[in-house]
Image (cartoon, rainbow, N blue to C red):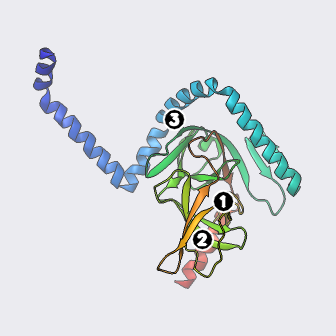
Amino acid sequence: MYRLLQLLHSYRAFLLLIFIEIVCLWLMVRNNPYHSAAYFHSSNALIGSIFKTRNNISQYLNLPLINEELANDNAQLRELIAQNQVPIIVNSTQDSLEQSGPNFAYSYISAKVINNSTRLIHNYITINKGSNNGVKPEMGVISAKGIVGKVMTVSKNFATVSSLLNTDVYVSAYIKRNNTFGSIHWDGNSIVRTKLMFVPKHIILQKGDTIVTSGYNSIFPEGIPIGFINDFELKDDGYYDIDVNLSNDFSNLGYVYIVKNPLKEERIELETAIKQENE
C-alpha cells in the first residue's frame, strides 16, 4: 500500500492533467451539439460491437422468452392484415416489410435492440442496423406495441435512437375517439407515462382514451399507438394536464422496426418552399 501511495504521489501531476482533460472533453461533448454528434457517430461502431456481444449472450440465455415475444408479434401482425386486408410484400434482400399500393408509402426495416437506457433525462436505444441497411437519421422507430422514438445517429452497422423517454423529443398525436390533436412530450418522471400537451379546455376527455400518432410529420405513419389517458386535470392557462400510460414497456424492448418513407424528402421540400413564401 505504501508503494502504491508513493507511485500515485510521484505521478500526481500527470494524473491530475488526465483527469482535467477528461472533464473538459466531457463538458465539450455534452454542451456542444456539433461535437456531441461527432462523438456519437465515431463511437457507434465500437460501442455497438461491445453491446452486440453482451446482448448476444443475454439473448441466448433468454431464447424461450424471445421466441414467445416473436410469436406474439407475428400473431398481432397477422390479425391486423386480416382486419384491414392490407397487401404486404416481404423483401428479404432489403430486410424490410413493405406495404404496396398508392396509399401505403411506408416500409419497415426490422432491427434488434442491443442497448437501452431508461434512467436518464435523454434516454437512447442502440439497434443493430445502420447505413448499410438503409437507416438514416430522423427515421421513426416503432415496435409491435407502438411508437419507440426516432433515429439520432447512424454508423455502418449500428444506430442510436432517441427514445420517447427523452425530454428533447416531441411527437404529434391525436385522441382517437374525437380526433383532437396535441403533442406528446415526456416530463422525465415515470418510464411508464408521458404527457399529452396543448389540448384545450373545451375538449371532453375520458380516462382510457387512446392516443395515436397523427401522421402530421413525415416520420411516423398515422395511427401508431402511443398509449391511453390515465388521468387529467384542467390548468389555469386553459389547457389540460394529461397523463398518458405508454403502450410500450421501455424496460423490455426486444425487436423494433425503422420506418422508411420514400416520399419524405418530397414532402419536406414542398412544405419548406411554402414556409419560405410566407416569410
Question: Contact, CB < 8 Å: mark 2 with mark 3?
Answer: no
Residue at 60% x, 44% y is 131
**What residue sits right under mark 2 in the picture?**
182
Residue underneath mark 3: 48
Which of discs 2 and 1 lies nearer the camera? The answer is 2
256, above or below 52, in the image: below
What is the crowding at mark 3: few (fewer than 14 residues within 10 Å), some, or many (at least 20)? Answer: many
Residue 31 lies in what quarter of the image? bottom left
Residue 27 falls left or right of residue 142: left
Q: Which residue is drawn at 12% across and 32% down?
A: 13
**Label 2 vs 1, first from the N-terminus:** 2
How far apart are the two marked residues, 2 and 1, measured between alpha carbons? 15 Å
Question: In terms of depth relative to the viewer, which is nearer, 28 or 213?
Answer: 213
Dot 3 falls on a residue whose secondary structure is helix
Which of disc 3 and disc 1 is earlier in sequence?
A: 3
Q: Mark 1 points at which residue?
A: 220
With respect to residue 26, does 273 lie above or below?
below
Residue at point 15%, 24% (across, down):
8
Q: Single out the mark in the foreground, 2 or 3.
A: 2
Cα–Cα span, label 1 and label 3: 25 Å
Q: Is residue 104 left or right of residue 197?
A: right
